[in-house]
Amino acid sequence: MSTRHFLSLMDCSPDELAGLITRAIELKALRRDGVPHDSLRNRVLGMIFEKASTRTRLSFEAGMIQLGGQAIFLSPRDTQLGRGEPVGDSAIVISRMLDAVMIRTFAHSMIEEFAANSQVPVINGLSDDLHPCQLLADMQTFTEHRGPIRGKTVAWIGDGNNMCNSYLLASVQFDFQLNIACPEGYEPQARFLAQAGDRVKLFRDPREAVKGAHLVSTDVWTSMGQEEETARRLKLFQPYQVNQALLDMAAEDVIFLHCLPAHRGEEISLDLLEDPRSKAWDQAENRLHAQKALLEFLIPSARAS
Ligand code: CP
Ligand code: NVA
């Protein structure tokens, strides 16, 4: 059987994704009830981080430990990857010693190249293009608070970045409508827009985009790797701040999500995370549960310990 990877939400079928959300909710309950569950005993995850992280590192590392396994943090500063060892060669060697590899990097093609040469599952922990693990947590959070997202309307406000691209793919896989409001020139990638087809509508005015929305989400205006553009983006994105007044224009039972870290006073108003409609803290915690479900799904349980 060929190795399964998780580089994008499209690497799983809609049924598999639904199964991951169900399993994440089960694993959350097991942890809440103090039931030990070591389905990944003796398994080892490698985590290559070429960009900073709090949630992704912690959730994968804690998740592996809670499932009875271990995680190893690999920084390019301390490995030969950072000194120019080819990605393909690195993947061959690294994957011979581990049971799965998570990668957070810049170019999405780096993760694809690694996966093409890896004999164990590779997980995208964020690239410039996509952040699929975050969408598992987001979908779990919506499901827990409001039930299935199928047929609902989601509004994405702000930058057409890796999170926005991921919401486009989620609209296909979880079957919801997606309204995107972004400044001209900051639209998500055309190939992801094309995949979402008539599920997506583009707006310039965030007030139009949030009308009837059951979920509103946004993200930082300057993603990792774009720091030089910060001043220009700060000015341009001002009309795209999500605040209480904007949420008031959405559906009455709207929830607000933010993948975090947030820049309070920029893409969200200072106290939006304290608004009862914000479920961002649950969303952050769900990274742990959703990724434990993903690790269980990807790492073959039949492999000898
Ligand atoms: N949301 C998210 O991926 O957070 P980190 O950058 O802290 O991992
Ligand atoms: N769009 C952000 C997400 C951080 C979790 C970034 O890529 O920096």
Image: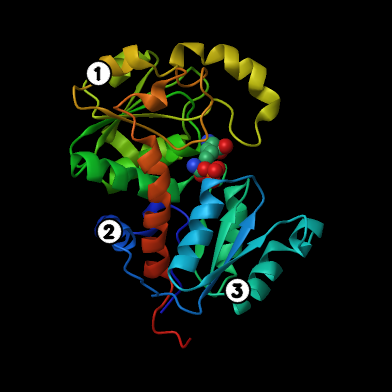
Relative to 179, say whether 270 is above or below: above
* Marked residue nearer the N-terminal end (2 or 3): 2
Label 3 is placed on what type of residue? Ser
User: Which residue was labeled with disc 3?
Assistant: 95
Amino acid type of disc 1? Lys
Q: Secondary structure at mark 2?
A: helix
Crowd around label 2: few <14 · some 14–19 · many ≥20 (10 Å): few
Q: Is residue 255 above or below residue 288?
A: above
Q: Is residue 65 left or right of residue 31?
A: right
Check disc 2 and give the amino acid type.
Ala
Residue 85, above or below 148: below
Please rate how many residues cluster around mark 3, counting C-alpha atoms within 10 Å: few if below 14, some from 14 to 19, many from 20.
many
Q: Closest to the observer: 228 or 295?
A: 295
User: Which residue is at the front of the view, 258 or 211?
Assistant: 258
**Residue 211: assigned label:** 1
Q: Position of residue 172 (x, y in %)?
A: 29, 44
Q: Residue at x 26, y 46 (%)?
A: 174
Q: Nearer the viewer, mark 2 or mark 1?
A: 2
Q: Which mark is residue 29?
A: 2
Report the residue at 58% width, 33% height from top.
223
